[in-house]
Amino acid sequence: MTEQAEQQPPLQPMPADWRRALAVVAHPDDLEYGCAAAIAEWTDGGREVAYLLATRGEAGIDGVAPDECGPLREAEQRASAAVVGVSTVEFLDHRDGVVEYGLGLRRDIAAAIRRHRPELVITLNHRDTWGGVGGGGYWNTPDHKAVGRAVLDAAADAGNRWIFPELVSEQGLEPWDGVRWVAVANTTTPTHAVDAGPGLERAIRSLLEHKAYISALTDQDPEEYVRGFLTGNVQQTAARFGGRPAVPFEVFPR
Ligand SMILES: [Zn+2]
């Protein structure tokens, strides 16, 4: 195992010559589990980051019915975004747990990319299984796979006038072909990384804002749980990033 890890190539530093990013994920908490330390680092450096969530995570807590849970999780998401310097948080209102990959989802994400005009688009693992600490064998969820794949596709759709012509004719959204990279967090096969040192404490506080979700998830002390999870992930990545704790991404250039 150790020998295998040593043979993996080093991760490259993330591209830095960009100003705007749009992070698109399925649920409240996906970015906080995935890459909030990197987002804190970017907003500290004066970059703009906006969040787009496909659902409100309304099916995420067993003891709370969706119509009550959706607003609760939306509020927790806005609070956790604010901790890492993100003030724009939008929701597409696809239904949590049954998000379908398809033209509707691609169109919604392409529209958001045209509105925000990012150079960097972030999403969460679109593959069948998880990376990260001990994650290789764990099956991913259908929503993450659907949204992640649709984001990778919509980065190109956003730049093509003829794929969803109604975005121009009905919404006045001109094509945006300026997405240069799609970076996937929590992937099994990272290529790049962002130094987690400066942003890690705020990433911990950001994930802790998902109070209702975390208290339903574990009996462990929330801070102990969150700190352990996020620190473990960034330390594992350090082995491939010059010994520095880091947030890994798989970068797809365009
Ligand atoms: Zn999720």
Image (spheres, rainbow, N blue to C red):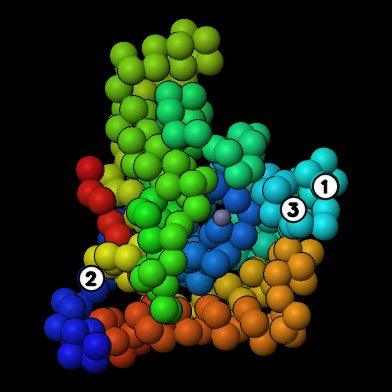
What's the distance in space between the residues labelled 3 and 2, CA to CA? 34 Å
Left or right of 228 on screen, residue 124: left
Tell me the number on the disc at residue 12. Answer: 2
Q: Which quadrant does the N terminus fall into? A: bottom left
Q: Residue at x 44, y 41 (%)?
A: 146
What's the distance in space between the residues labelled 2 and 1, CA to CA? 43 Å
Q: Which residue is mark 3?
A: 73
Q: Residue at x 58, y 73 (%)?
A: 203
Q: Secondary structure at mark 3?
A: helix
Q: Is residue 194 above or below residue 48?
A: below
Q: Is residue 111 above or below residue 29?
A: above
> Who is closer to the viewer here, 173 or 94?
94
Tell me the number on the disc at residue 65. Answer: 1
Q: Amino acid at mark 2?
A: Gln
- Nearer to us: label 2 or label 1: 1
Cβ at disc 1 under 8 Å from ligand 1: no
Q: Residue at x 33, y 18 (%)?
A: 163
Left or right of 231 on screen, residue 75: right
Q: Amino acid at mark 3?
A: Arg
Q: Secondary structure at mark 1?
A: loop
Q: Identify the image quadrant of residue 10.
A: bottom left
